[in-house]
Amino acid sequence: MAWSTREIAELAGTTVNTVRHYHRSGLLEQPRRLSNGYKQYDAGHLVRLLQIRRLRELGVPLAQMESVGSAGTSPRAALLSIDADLAASIERLQRARAEIRAIVEGGTATDVPSGFEHLADRLSTPARSLMLVYSQLYDEAAMDDLKTMVESEPDSASTEFDALPADADEATRQRLAEAFAPQLADLLGTYDWLADPTGRMPMGEAVTRDTFLHTIVEVYNEAQLDVLVRASALAMVPTDSPGSPDSPDSPAASFPMQMTEGDSDD
């Protein structure tokens, strides 16, 4: 008994294009051809197609099917690796479902990174945006530290900063910077990587810096950015030193967290 491509596709519950794809990927051997050029599939091809379909139903990626075997063999190591991948996928889906349920019930937010949902009410809209961007720029350990920073910050620490108008006067800017500086200095002393976050940047320093700069100048106004730079400089350099904010060689902010609100990395 021999079948055409269309017939064997129907028998296997798939499509002609899928059969052709399996040929191209090397998962299915080419059948013999009649003198008129038509393909003739036999029972071996049907069995292989059904095996591939079975593996697909189990979630085995096409790229890993060859390692599982084509003649009924099932190498243990390959299957254990696939099982581990499936377990990780299930865990991710379960977390996603839990978050979706919480969102539907009104208990969390979608505009913060995973794990920051309970802190959403403590973050301003700009800070939420920055946290989402940070989650792409910094590694998991850095994000865990940032979460701890937000959790430990007093609720009232940035209320005035949030409402700061773009035309805020010099005295107000300096007062806010001086109020933030001690807390920033404490963060720098607690988290060494803040002074040099290079090792926490999976996408590289250049991409991280450019992305951060493009984001922060959009989410904060001119006065808020000025306060962040002043506070960062005060936190890193003693006020009476040559590198104080009033000095021409004052350093720019260079760490990825200014309370729950600021961030400067250039």
Image (cartoon, rainbow, N blue to C red):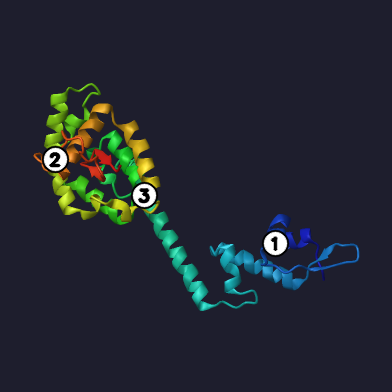
Query: As drawn, is 266 to the left or to the right of 152?
Result: right
Q: Which residue is mark 2?
A: 242
**In the figure, is residue 102 to the left or right of 247?**
right
Q: Residue at x 20, y 23 (%)?
A: 168
Nearer the camera: disc 1 or disc 2: 2
Residue 15 x %, y %: 70, 56
Q: CA distance from mark 1 to mark 3?
A: 41 Å
The part of the image, by quadrant, that contains residue 123 is: top left
Q: Amino acid at mark 3?
A: Glu
Which of the numbered marks, if any, corresponds to residue 24?
A: 1
In this image, 78 relative to 113: left or right? right
Q: SS at mark 1?
A: helix
Query: Which amino acid type is marked by label 1?
Result: Arg
In this rendering, does residue 133 appear at all? yes
Residue under label 3, please give it: 205
* Amino acid found under the numbered disc labelled 2: Pro
| Mark found first going from the N terminus, 2 or 3 | 3
Residue shown at the point (60%, 78%) measured from the top left: 73
First in sequence: mark 1 vs mark 2: 1
User: In the image, what residue occupies the spot 27% across and 27% down?
Assistant: 222
Q: Where residue 248 appears, x then y in whole percent?
A: 20, 35
